[in-house]
Image (cartoon, grey):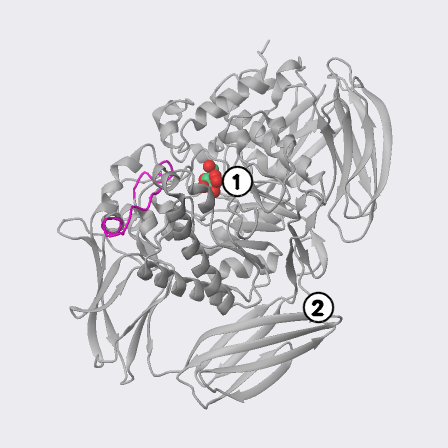
Amino acid sequence: MEEAGGDISAPFLVPGDAISALAAAGEIAEPYWGRNEYDLRWIGEGDWLARRSFTLEGDRPAELVLESLDTLATVRVDGEVVLDADNAFRTWRADLSHLAAGEHEIEITFHSNVAGGAARQGAQPFYIPYHAGNSPIPHGNMLRKVQCDFGWDWNIALAPFGLYGRAEIVAADAPRIERLEVEQEHSEGLVTLTVTAYIAGAEGETCRLSFAGQELEGAVEGGGITAIFDIENPRLWWPAGLGEQHLHDLEVHCGEAFARRRIGLRQIELVTEADDAGTSFMLQVNGEPVFARGANWIPADALAGRITEAGTRDLLQSAVDANMNMIRVWGGGRYEPDSFYDACDELGLMVWQDFMFACNLYPSTPDFLANVDAEVREQAGRLHHHACVALWCGDNELIGALTWFPESRDNRDRYLVNYDRLNRTIEAALSETAPGATWWPSSPSPGPMNFGDAWHDDSAGDMHFWSVWHENREFDHYRDVSPRFCSEFGFQSYPSLNAIKRFAAPEDWNISNPIFESHQKNVGGNERIAATMFRYFRWPENFEDFVWLSQIQQGLAIKTAVTHWRSLKPHCMGTLYWQLNDTWPVCSWSSLDHGGDWKLMHHMAQSFYAPVLATAVPRKDGSIDIVGISDRLEDVDLTVTAYATSMDGTARELGQGHATLALRAEVLISLPAGTLEEGEVLTFGWEGSDGTHAGDIFAPKPWKSYDLPDARPAAEIAREGVDWLVTLSVEAMSFFLTAEASVPGRWSRNAVHLGPGTTSTLRFTPADPEAQPEFLLRDLHSATMKRT
Ligand code: BMA
């Protein structure tokens, strides 16, 4: 690979991206370190060439297939143009049938996407605004390319490019299974699966389709063949926690062509029905209402060449381990590879799939719409059969974006029609490709043909509730809204120390060092984190304490939202917090560090997303209700016992409550205002007939108002195989007691509350089994109270 007209070159491995290739060859500095980002923006501003030779064998006509070619690219073979590509979300094919057997050379010109975006903007009939705050590199909205490649309020802006998928030469005259259309129809004790295989180059040939032990044969007619399978008393697919994720094999054999899919039999419906509060928004799986517990997914790395299947799987596993059953593939990223959806099928993670448009306005010129139409058909055709795919959504925040720019505010008619043309194109292409697919026009949206404010209207549709973070409201403001389904809400923290070590040297560890400002992409984000600490906590002693407290604070914010909205069940039927993962080490709303380690909020999510939960809900009159919630299909008997606990650990029992929980959340105990005395917090434990056994605390006042004791936390360390067992004990109440390891790895639990007389054992699995970690304890006292 070489710079066009320049003198830099590097080996370019496919699949891969050019920036990672340059870094691996030592031609540029590591992009994620320090403030290197700003010195590397030039890479995306120029053209680059990649070339290699290949040998064509035999005498069959050849065809070139390129997947995930990012984005504006011209492909030449032996100097002759065979392809001009302009959509990273489509597979490109070039006819090479004119080539004879022997040696040939292929060359890809990666045109600057930065320059190409600007040129396309200039050619628009009217200006199409983009969100400058999210995209320091302009005009990414002109290109069908990962939108956060141009930066985002959590992403590095490098406009990376490359070739990330299949790059193959195939026989052009071989039959090809272009796509499978799979539809399920569920009735009592029976599923009918209709499979249509669209096959090129096999007209009249006999094909064999098999599914769940049944086999059907037929001839290809009019480019396709349809088989209908009836499966009696089928084993169904369920989201995580509600049953098994059974997958049946579907195979299609057509001469040389072969395709295999794994199909989970399930029916997922979106129920939107008028009710007293507005309109419901509820997923129903196999006839059962399902509360969606989850988070938003962004690309697994800012540089596609650094994404691995194992790394992605690990992030998804962490989602399930934290009791999630749904993730939203957000519209500013990419349609993920097959292995991602295979993993979600296997793990029982429902997927809310956005089409890839986010926070900008987009063209509606015929050429742009034709490109989008082809993209939607390809992506819906590729993904719709997955059991995990629950819902398809037109875009992220495009309706809101109509209000963000002077051009669209001044001429809303024009930009709304422009938007609707795009949205209709997507909807039509989806419904023609995947007739049974559930469509939702936009996220957030109050509903079809409603272009209102789903950031503040909580009566219908999915909501993005950002007032606490972006409008600097108090955490309790989460309790002022009652969403039907909240598909975004978030609060930032600093990344963990092990992630910080990957971009800043210890001498730069200061919360407002410019390095930390460059690893904070939301204007004012670090100030918001610090200001919120002033609101709720005593000021942390040092940098490490600040980092730790930022994660506790983040966890408390999101816990407030999730527990409150779960307590409204079934009025509210889903919470997907922003955001699960990070694309690079950065201050952000994620609960997982870049690399997959759990931030403290992820540990807290594991608790607040438990399928059976009791939670404290403070009311405006000062009383506190403890509410029981169950997401199980069977009824659960839940008993909760509440105590008023002093800082030394002495507990006064306040009473017991009990309920049999079905769909509806129920109040288990009501504690009148004034139940807790000065210096006391509410502690409560619950037991469920399903085996649930857990506890929590609730501090009705900001933590800064409590004089926390020094609980003298102690740890006993033992080895078990590659794991380390850390057994914690304390002499008084210790809040958010955390064990930290000096090396990356996974904790079984963390940030626990502990009183005297009990112990808690945390398990640590280091990423490197050979590592010899050092452990350190931190709790709210050690991080925020002046040491004596
Ligand atoms: C949401 C998302 C993203 C963004 C996040 C945080 O609205 O859709 O665009 O990163 O807010 O600001």
Secondary structure under the numbered disc 2 in the rendered image? loop
| x then y, percent, for residue 38 | 28, 35
Q: As rendered, which of 38 and 143 lies closer to the eye?
A: 143
Q: Is 158 left, or right, of 538 in this rendering?
A: left
Q: Quadrant of the image for the C terminus?
A: top right
- The answer to whether residue 129 is magenta is yes
The chief SS type of the magenta part is loop
Q: Residues within 10 Å of mark 1 (few under 14, many from 20)?
A: some
Q: Name the residue tied to disc 2.
A: 235
| x then y, percent, for residue 534 | 54, 17
Q: Is 205 left, or right, of 667 in this rendering?
A: left
Q: Residue furthest top?
A: 788
Write the residue at 45% across / 59% down: 424
Q: Does the beta carbon of the residue at mark 2 sit less than 8 Å from ligand 1?
A: no
How many numbered markers are drawn? 2
The kind of residue tagged 1 is: Asp
Against 651, residue 269 (above or below) is below
Q: Residues within 10 Å of mark 2 (few under 14, many from 20)?
A: some
The kind of residue tagged 2 is: Arg
Does residue 319 appear in the picture of this structure? Answer: yes
Q: Nearer the viewer, mark 1 or mark 2?
A: 1
Secondary structure under the numbered disc 1 in the rendered image? loop
Disc number placed over residue 588 in the picture, else none: none
Residue range in magenta is: 119-138
Against 256, residue 366 (above or below) is above
Write the residue at 56% across / 55% down: 351
Q: Name the residue tied to disc 1.
A: 453
| x then y, percent, for residue 207 | 51, 86
